[in-house]
């Protein structure tokens, strides 16, 4: 949560008068059919589309989503009984898509704060049938996960079931899945937790090149939960002001062969260890060199900028000796106006079909979502406003996800929205939108020209939420991607995709070699006669959680059969030819 250009004068005046001092860290930083099994080796190529004009907002002729929350059995809820007391109360929560027991459908874990004025905290809902869930939090060993803010679900020990990392206030909790029951193994993490630090988003990937999965965790801000909130920031409470809190350092948790983790941020990535208000982190191949990068998305964009870290290898064949900031070379540091971004959420996808991943970063009210368009030549170019995202600049955006809404082969964008301020606070400052806002849906024409959708009255997108975390997942396995949104107030919302199908889909499940059995870091290309469609298996996307572990491809009408190519993180390449569409394909690394 940052401050837009309209809010900066108010905040600075507040600070000059009676609010807390600017936090300055010691380093000077400011505060359907059965799955098909395939295996086998090859390469890929793609074509680039032309530009097209940007459309104005439109109202669709039919519904896109229906709200199935009530009937689904998902009852996790946050209901503050009084005004938010701390910034942590305003920031949560997150949702992780996972497979608890190896049976369909996929399951949902909600990371939610507990305590005074809130409901009973985090919840695990296990799928019993189509859009039918049961609360099995206690039965699965997750009754006590700490003061949670976010989560990350992935198989960390290579036994082919999903484990769970929970981020929160004051530290992390790690749970290994043993036969569908989670066992607390948090003592395996060797890290120094600063009291009161809000650990937010997390990401998993092979950072040190040894084949297993490591973690990057966003350290945001820290506060003394036992102390009275600071005062003197009228018309806003200081609890809503980022600059009332000290910034925190991020964590780089490297996994050892014995399953323990050690924080190596200071030794390997000093830029990552810098104390600054980081909300979003990701591990993905951003610069296209077939090696993972670390993305660091910071709040308070007028004071700190986002970073892209790249590995630098020393002599020999070992892992990287260091990670250095290459954001000036790659891009992603500044928006199109040359300012830092109040980065709240992050998602990636090839939105123009040119064979290179593009990246969207959400932000504070009046700072439009940034869209970094990449071509493999020079830095990625920020084109959020020219691409149409300026149409919803007045909203306060958090989690976001690229997905193919209508199966036409183009990646669309959905964003969770909701102000960090209450209605009264927002009105006092002069913001147009309040605490509860409509989710934002942008439909892509295939050339990265996005049209903002004004939902129909009978569409679930027409219900305002205090949106925070977001996950894109095929909840009912019908080939259309659904959306789960977590609210700061109230219960989560399950948006079932009922959009009319335009084309086809292919869902790809990856089975990698242990210890990276989840296939994290693999790049998958689905090739048709006309072009290739690109995805990467990332863990940690949106805001405070992760998406469907299966890779989903929308494909245009008339497509099929297709060729599927996988480049695994190990460098092994696998190809599956003559694959029929409208089904799930399982591809194995061995």
Image (spheres, grey):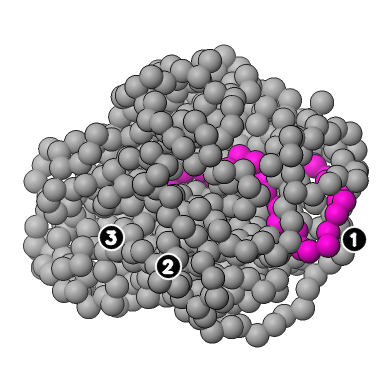
Q: Considering only vertical position in the picture, is 332 above or below 162?
A: below
Q: Position of residue 96 (x, y in %)?
A: 47, 39
Q: Residue at x 14, y 54 (%)?
A: 83
Q: Position of residue 534 (x, y in %)?
A: 74, 54
Q: What residue is disc 1 on?
A: 529
Q: Considering only vertical position in the picture, is 362 above or below 197?
A: below
What secondary structure is marked by label 1?
loop
State left or right for residue 337 relative to residue 80. Answer: right
What secondary structure is marked by label 3?
loop
Q: Considering only vertical position in the picture, is 520 above or below 488?
A: above
Distance Cα–Cα, label 3 vs label 1: 47 Å
Q: Earlier in the sequence, mark 2 or mark 3?
A: 3
Give, as a single range, the part of the protein colored magenta: 540-569
Q: Which class describes the residues within 10 Å of circle 1: few (<14), some (14-19), or many (20+)? A: few
Q: Which class describes the residues within 10 Å of circle 2: few (<14), some (14-19), or many (20+)? A: few
Q: Are marks 3 and 1 in contact (CB under 8 Å)?
A: no
What secondary structure is marked by label 2?
loop
Q: Is residue 17 magenta?
A: no
Eye-nearest disc, 2 or 1: 2
Q: What residue is disc 2 on?
A: 458
The kind of secondary structure the magenta stretch mainly shows is loop
Eye-nearest disc, 3 or 1: 1
- Which mark is on residue 420? 3
Work out whether residue 510 or residue 520 is closer to the camera in this orientation and state it: 510
Work out whether residue 411 or residue 174 is closer to the camera in this orientation and state it: 411
Q: Residue at x 28, y 77 (%)?
A: 432
State left or right for residue 257 relative to residue 3. Answer: right
Q: Earlier in the sequence, mark 2 or mark 1?
A: 2
Q: Residue at x 75, y 49 (%)?
A: 582
Q: Position of residue 198 (x, y in %)?
A: 32, 42
Q: Is residue 307 visible?
A: no
Quadrant for the C terminus, please. top right
């Amino acid at each position: 949560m940052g401050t837009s250009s309209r809010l900066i004068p108010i905040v600075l005046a507040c600070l000059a008068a009676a609010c807390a001092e600017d936090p300055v860290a010691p380093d000077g930083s400011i505060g359907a059919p059965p799955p098909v099994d395939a295996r086998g080796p090859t390469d890929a190529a793609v074509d680039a589309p032309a530009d097209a004009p940007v459309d104005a907002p439109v109202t669709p002729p039919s519904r896109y989503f229906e709200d199935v929350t009530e009937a689904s059995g998902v009852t996790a809820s946050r209901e503050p009984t009084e005004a938010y007391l701390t910034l942590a109360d305003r920031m949560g929560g997150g949702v992780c898509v996972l497979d608890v027991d190896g049976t369909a459908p996929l399951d949902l874990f909600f990371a939610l704060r507990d305590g005074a004025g809130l409901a009973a905290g985090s919840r695990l809902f296990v799928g019993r049938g189509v859009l039918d869930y049961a609360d099995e939090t206690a039965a699965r060993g997750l009754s006590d996960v700490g003061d949670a803010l976010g989560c990350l679900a992935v198989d960390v020990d290579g036994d082919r079931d999903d484990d769970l990392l929970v981020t929160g206030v004051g530290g992390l909790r790690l749970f290994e899945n043993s036969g569908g029951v989670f066992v607390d193994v948090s003592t395996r993490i060797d890290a120094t937790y600063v009291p009161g630090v809000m650990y937010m988003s997390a990401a998993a990937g092979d950072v040190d090149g040894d084949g297993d999965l490591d973690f990057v965790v966003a350290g945001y801000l820290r506060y003394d939960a036992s102390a009275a909130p600071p005062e003197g920031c009228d018309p806003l409470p200081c609890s809503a002001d980022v600059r009332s809190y000290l910034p925190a350092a991020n964590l780089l948790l490297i996994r050892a062969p014995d399953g323990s983790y050690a924080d190596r941020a200071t030794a390997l990535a000093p830029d990552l260890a810098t104390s600054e208000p980081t909300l979003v982190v990701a591990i993905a191949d951003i610069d296209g060199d077939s090696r993972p990068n670390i993305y660091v998305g910071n709040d308070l964009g007028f004071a700190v900028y986002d970073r892209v870290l790249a590995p630098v290898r020393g002599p020999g064949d070992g892992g990287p000796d260091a990670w250095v900031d290459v954001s000036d070379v790659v891009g992603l540091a500044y928006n199109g106006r040359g300012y830092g971004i109040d980065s709240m959420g992050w998602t990636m996808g090839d939105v123009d079909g040119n064979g290179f991943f593009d990246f969207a970063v959400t932000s504070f009210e009046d700072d439009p979502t940034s869209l970094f368009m990449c071509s493999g030549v020079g830095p990625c170019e920020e084109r959020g406003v020219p691409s149409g995202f300026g149409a919803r600049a007045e909203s306060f955006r958090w989690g976001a996800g690229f997905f193919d809404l209508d199966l036409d082969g183009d990646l669309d964008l959905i964003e969770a929205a909701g102000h960090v301020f209450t209605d009264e606070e927002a009105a006092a400052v002069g913001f147009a939108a309040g605490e509860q806002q409509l989710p934002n849906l942008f439909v892509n024409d295939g050339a990265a020209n996005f049209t903002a959708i004004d939902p129909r009255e009978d569409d679930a997108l027409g219900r305002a939420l205090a949106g925070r975390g977001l996950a894109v997942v095929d909840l009912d396995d019908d080939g259309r991607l659904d959306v789960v949104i977590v609210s700061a107030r109230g219960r989560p919302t399950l948006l079932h995709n009922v959009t009319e199908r335009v084309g086809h889909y292919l869902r790809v499940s990856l089975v990698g070699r242990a210890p990276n059995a989840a296939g994290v870091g693999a790049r998958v290309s689905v090739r048709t006669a006309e072009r290739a469609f690109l995805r990467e298996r990332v863990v940690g996307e949106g805001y405070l959680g992760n998406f469907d572990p299966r890779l989903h491809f929308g494909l245009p009408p008339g497509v099929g059969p297709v060729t599927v190519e996988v480049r695994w993180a190990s460098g092994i390449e696998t190809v599956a030819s003559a694959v029929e569409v409208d089904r799930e394909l399982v591809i194995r690394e061995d």
